[in-house]
Amino acid sequence: MPRWGFRSATDVLTRGPTVTLARIADQFGVQLATIARARIDTLNRRSAPRNWEGLISEMARAHAEELELHAKKLRKMARELVESSRKS
């Protein structure tokens, strides 16, 4: 029986790591609405959290690492699917 079924393969393909505004708000310890309002360009805008550059930089590095790990999973899955299709 092949290691990869259609469902498991599409799960890996579509469940890559993401960064949401909720995740950003959580990292800053603020409400989602605070982050959302800091992003808008209107008179009702809020200021971005203080020292946001450092935390966003850390999150960007961590996200890059998550993406690299996911890319490895995708490449491995692709190799295994090609090998499996050759055996069929």
Image (tube, grey):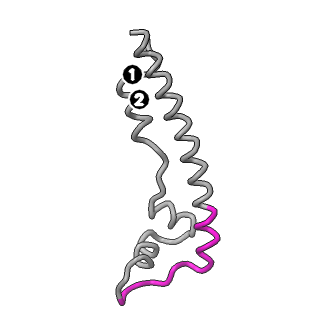
Q: For the point 40% across and 34% down, which residue is it?
A: 11
Mark 1 nearby-residue class (10 Å; few <14, some 14–19, many ≥20): few
Q: Are marks 1 and 2 in contact (CB under 8 Å)?
A: yes
Q: Position of residue 79 (x, y in %)?
A: 50, 25
Element type at marker 2?
A: helix
Asked if residue 25 is positioned above or below residue 43 in the image, the reply reads above
Pick the front one: 86 or 28: 86
User: Count of labels shown?
Assistant: 2
Q: For the point 60% across and 73% down, which residue is it?
A: 53
Q: Amino acid at mark 1?
A: Gly
Write down the quadrant of residue 56 in the picture. Answer: bottom right
Residue to which mark 2 is pinned: 9
Q: Position of residue 27 (x, y in %)?
A: 57, 64
Q: Amino acid at mark 2?
A: Ala
- Magenta segment range? 43-58
Residue to which mark 1 is pinned: 5
- Residue 71: mark in rendering: none
Q: Position of residue 70 (x, y in %)?
A: 53, 41
Q: Is residue 75 magenta?
A: no
Decide if residue 12 is on the left or right side of residue 51: left
Q: Is residue 51 magenta?
A: yes
User: Seen from this angle, which residue lies furthest front?
Assistant: 86
Q: For the point 37% across and 87% down, which residue is it?
A: 44
Write down the quadrant of residue 36 in the picture. Answer: bottom left
Q: For the point 45% across and 76% down, which residue is it?
A: 34
Asked if residue 33 is positioned above or below residue 63 in the image, the reply reads below
Asked if residue 85 is positioned above or below residue 19 in the image, the reply reads above
User: Seen from this angle, which residue lies furthest bottom?
Assistant: 43
Quadrant where the C terminus sits is top left
